[in-house]
Image (cartoon, rainbow, N blue to C red):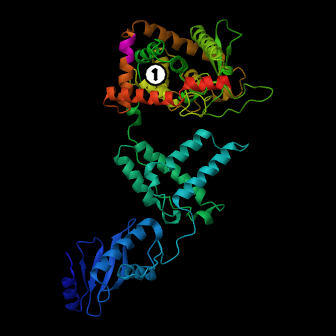
Amino acid sequence: MDLNATSVARLVREAGEDYKEFADGACPGLTLRTHRAGSRWFARFRHEGPQVRILLGDAKVWTLAQARFVAIDVRRHVEAGHGIPATEWIELKRAAPASKGETVEVPAYMPRTAPPATWTYREAREAWGAWLRREAESPAQAFRPATVRNYSAVVGCPGMRALDDRFVSRIDAGDVAQVVESLVQEGKRSQGRDVVRVTKRLWAWLGEPGQAKRSGAAAGAMVGLKAPRLGNTKGRQHFPLLQEVAIMLRIAQHGVLSDGVGMAVELLIYTAQRRLSIVRARVDEFEPWAERNGWGLWWQGHRKISRGGPTERDPRAGSHALPLPPSVWWRIEAYLKRTGEDAAVAGRERSEWMFPKFRARRAGGDLDGHMAEDTLTHAVSAMPGCRATPHDVRRAFATHLQEDLGIASSRVGMVLDHAQSDLLNVTDESATARRYTREQMLGLKAPTIDAWVEALRVAKISIELPDSETLKALLVAENLRQRGVKDPVAEKARRAAASAKAWAEGRTTRQRARQTAAT
């Protein structure tokens, strides 16, 4: 009911033996509890699940205006994470508006009981991230940098950051389950599974003796947390036909893409390796194959599955060797020659990366890094007539070689570098042999890759692409659509204005290159 001074006085005066509560319609959460022995004001609301009920004061002493004013501040005190305020703080809040000319000092917050002297969720995930980075940088290299980035991103996703201001000691499986449920409702089941998997690892670390007292976390707090089902994952995976991959290859070799991106897509298609392996390829990993005229070798240093590391006696130890047929090796040599000459003309050394990044994100950034993984994904997804992702190329490689050409799955697994493959009908039956064989089964890998390259050559012959201008327009339009640009004309004007501003401020790549050369 909408309370006023008259109705409050009447309800207090007519109070009987039974307790009655009246909610104030003008101030959500404020209630008047009447009884013959005495009537009182309360603030009632829900916070993080359970209902909170806080006594404000005697209805004969407190006015309705005071009760409304303090009830709002009490709720803010609790929702800000400071706990239930002390009685003295509530009284100070009541007295502050009533003071005439006198200043009543009211602290920002005054909890009734001291808050836990332990970590909040924000502090916990930051401490775990720092520990993961130290472990990754230690001589033992307990974690890969990519794993550290993945774990930090999962526990710091927007859904989990909603728990940042809560103490770890007061977070349980139900709180994380609510985050996972919201992700499922948004159609992000895979991310929900990641949240469950990584959160359990975080809580296991928080509950270890080394930081249990500092974190305040209970080791078994996440025991009952369950990941959502993914359903028919194989049914959602895309197994592109050879023709679709051939379209991707034809566009990559057309010249409409930049030289580096086009060559990266070519290497991705010819070798069927992972995105990170492609973008992290180094120039010194490529060399001619002395035993076979016209062939080359790619000693891939980045591997998802650890096989040891380089030693002084064997600098190639731990690498994944891939034979490159003459038609592929010729294109790689031509690319290296072109990029080397371009670097010499610009007055700088050729980057150690096979596919260096185009430009720094901002002036003063790292100019000598490798191409981003997402650059490959965006380039492939914008190609007309293709819906395959870079990882789908691996599925096409396995499917075509096994089902159409009858090549043994063990040989396919050697090229894909899988210990236990997650691809359909692909198993790696030669793990033991490869572990103890120095030549890395090059004699078995070479015919497998050669058959794939030949199949692509034949499939590519019948593909016709539109003219360069039309193809470029299609790629740009799809790229803009993926970025959510609804007005291409306005976007073009915006980019032109940004470029003009960067030029006026001397921040363009060409200007920075000139400055570097001059110094």
- Name the residue carrying label 1: 396
- Taking the spot 41% from the left edge, 29% from the top edge, the residue there is 497
* Screen quadrant of the N terminus: bottom left
Quarter of the view holding residue 2: bottom left
Image coordinates for residue 188, horizontal then vertical, percent: 39, 43
Image coordinates for residue 73, horizontal then vertical, percent: 38, 72
Q: Relative to 321, is 387 on the left or the right?
A: left
Residue closest to the far bottom? 37
- Taking the spot 62% from the left edge, 31% from the top edge, the residue there is 303
Observer-nearest of 502 and 416: 502
Observer-nearest of 26 and 426: 26
Relative to residue 243, is residue 86 depicted above or below? below
Label 1: element kind: helix
Disc 1 residue type (three-letter)? Ala
Residue closest to the far right? 313
Q: Is residue 238 magenta?
A: no
Image coordinates for residue 227, horizontal then vertical, percent: 44, 49
Q: Is residue 471 magenta?
A: yes
Confirm whether residue 425 shows in the render.
Answer: no
Confirm whether residue 49 shows in the render.
Answer: yes
Quarter of the view holding residue 6: bottom left
* Screen quadrant of the C terminus: top right
The part of the chain drawn in magenta is 468-472
Q: Residues within 10 Å of mark 1 (few under 14, many from 20)?
A: many
Image coordinates for residue 415, horizontal then vertical, percent: 58, 22
- Taking the spot 53% from the left edge, 16% from the top edge, the residue there is 259
- Is the magenta region chiefly helix, strand or loop? helix
